[in-house]
Image (spheres, rainbow, N blue to C red):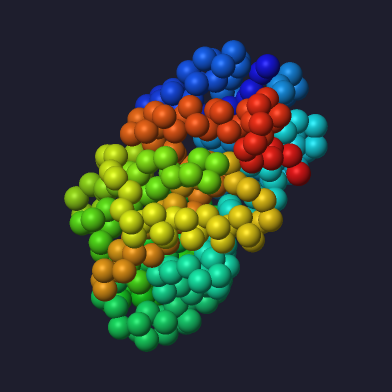
Amino acid sequence: MRVAIVSCEGLPSWEVDDAPLFRAFSARGIDAVAVPWTQLGPGFDAALLRTPWDYADRLPAFLDWAEDFHGHTPLWHPPDVLRWNLDKRYLFELRDAGLPIAPSVLLEPDDGRRLMQVVRSWGVERAFLKPVVGASARHTRRFHASEVEAAAAWMANVGETMILQPYLASVETLGETSAIVIDGAITHGVVKRAVAGDYRVQDDHGGTDEGVTVSETMRRLTEAAWRAAEDRLGRRLLYGRVDALALPTGEWVLNELEVVEPSLFFRHGPHAAEALAEAFLRGLGVGGGGAECRG
């Protein structure tokens, strides 16, 4: 059996966190091969999305590819999940389902006047913009309230739909906390920290990470977000990561729920790679139970 581990062109040489996953497949007699989605052809029995990190600048092409590929080969997660989760408008749906998120406003590129009005009405010192489609802090901007006009001009120049939020400075002190979920079960926790003075916690921006015990608060938030996502999609999800940040009040809020191509930090929980391989194969009918890998 051959499984494609879907990646991207130009994957950074330092990205080796999925090594335990390849070992887990190999131990089960599965030939797992990393292939960029743009080069993925026939000859595979199934495919698992892991690092297709170049989708953000060509999302329509990526979704078209997923639809076509899934038409003849099981792809996990399937296209309906990709369409929902690769657009951060899903955060508003989860908020409406009762999940706590930071105060958030959806803005179009020409909504500069509204951006200024909202920031001033919040009375915050700093605010934050992120695109509804993005990865690795692409096209994000942290700005001071006195810089709203410059931020509005920047947003117009980027030309993408944005989410405006108060800037949560806790990312610089407490970091961003994550819980990894495999087939409905939390396997391990991670805290990600940016370099001093920055907010970008990703590896490619110099961020660091360490394994942590998942707190009861984080567990409740993760389980609630997972249930809401599965209810919205009408299917069980195979894998994902729930990210949370702390508000100035101390309340933890959902920052992202990533179920397409999240780093799963197997280096802090190698048993999770074993669990993912098992659940993936069960979903394909190689064993019993697990999330269904078709549809």
Farthest residue in the right direction?
Answer: 72
Res 144 seen here: no
- Position of the N terminus, as image quadrant, is top right
Q: Position of residue 140 (x, y in %)?
A: 41, 58
Of residues 280 and 143, the one drawn nearer to the viewer in this rendering:
280
Residue beneath the point at 25% across and 61% down: 170
Quarter of the figure with residue 263:
top left
Residue 236, x across and y down, in percent: 63, 48
The structure residue drawn at horizontal position 44% and vertical position 23%, both measured from the top left corner, is 19
- Quarter the C terminus occupies: top right
Report whether residue 221 is seen.
yes
Q: How many marks?
A: 0
Q: Is residue 179 left or right of residue 160?
A: left
Q: 68 or 286: nearer the eye?
A: 286
- Picture layout, residue 66 above or below residue 4: below
The picture places residue 171, in percent across and down from the top left corner, at 28, 57
Q: Is residue 173 above or below residue 202?
A: below
Q: Which residue occupies 48% across, 81% down?
A: 114
Q: Name the residue: 74% across, 18% down.
A: 43
Instruction: Determine which quarter of the picture holds residue 133.
Output: bottom right
Q: Is residue 195 above or below residue 45?
A: below
Q: Judge by depth and name the residue closer to the eye, 254 or 219.
A: 219
